[in-house]
Image: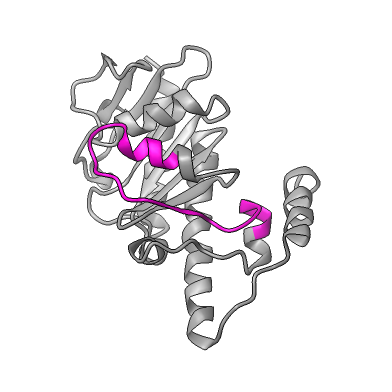
Amino acid sequence: MLENFKKELVELHQELPKNDLVRWTGGNVSARDPKTGLVVIKASGIRFEDMKPKHMVVLDMEGKMVEGDFKPSSDVYSHIYIYKHRPDVNGVVHTHSRYATAFAAVGKSIPCVLTAMGDEFGGPIPCGGFALIGDEAIGKVVIESIGKSPSVLLKSHGVFAVGKTAEAAVKAAVMTEDVAATVWLAMQIGTPESIPQEDVDKLHYRYTNVYGQ
């Protein structure tokens, strides 16, 4: 089932170590098929370099396994919770990328001090509270905290990013780490100033409505 999604997710998972967002088996990408509502996510504990389409698990929106030979990612119920509460989202990514997670470790949002943040995120990257892994708790914090941003930090944990597609969610996760690193470096030099929200709104509008082909 959903073989194209499985193949795409194998490729997208490779972007996580390639962009230095994960270590060993941490992190995951899922996709929801808007036609069937079925969710595809990687099996738990599979190393990225060993990952193949057979390591993808298909579940329904209640978390019941529809197809697969492996146990799904331990974050699966939080992914499904996000999909249930965000019908516009068809891709979810979780990482422990270093700089972004450093902000999460101290419970701080990443301030919008870069035009790239205005473009991609439309404001600061928020930081939600702490939640334990294994059920819907993380998904609830994501929904409560993410606002209009495509990514959110979870205190003492890491990054969750969302998108209209799994690829869009991976892009948001990559950009989250990129701006987190730049903002952290800027903080070592001085205190960066946040861009006024009216200018952020203009940047975000241009990026989402004018930029590109």
Residue 27: x, y in percent? 31, 46
Q: Is 211 covered by the magenta stretch?
A: no
Residue shown at 56% from the left, 65% from the top? 111
- Give the colouring mode of the picture: one colour
Q: Quadrant of residue 40?
A: top left
Residue 186: x, y in percent? 54, 80
Q: In the picture provided, is 168 more to the left or to the right than 1?
A: right
Out of 99 and 174, give the one closest to the viewer. 99
Q: In the picture provided, is 25 more to the left or to the right than 110?
A: left
Q: Quadrant of the N terminus?
A: top left
Residue shown at 39% from the left, 36% from the top? 140
Q: Is residue 84 above or below residue 208?
A: above
The outermost residue toward the bottom is: 189
Residue 206: x, y in percent? 79, 51
- Which stretch appears magenta? 118-142
Q: Is residue 52 above or below residue 174?
A: above
Out of 75 and 67, give the one closest to the viewer. 75
Q: Is residue 208 above or below residue 196?
A: above
Out of 6 and 107, give the one closest to the viewer. 107
Residue 29 visible in the current orientation = no
Residue shown at 60% from the left, 43% from the top? 148
Q: In the picture provided, is 50 more to the left or to the right than 204?
A: left
Residue 210: x, y in percent? 81, 47
Number of labels in the image equals: 0
Residue 143 visible in the current orientation = yes
Q: Is 128 covered by the magenta stretch?
A: yes
Q: Is residue 186 above or below residue 166?
A: below
Q: Quadrant of the C terminus?
A: top right
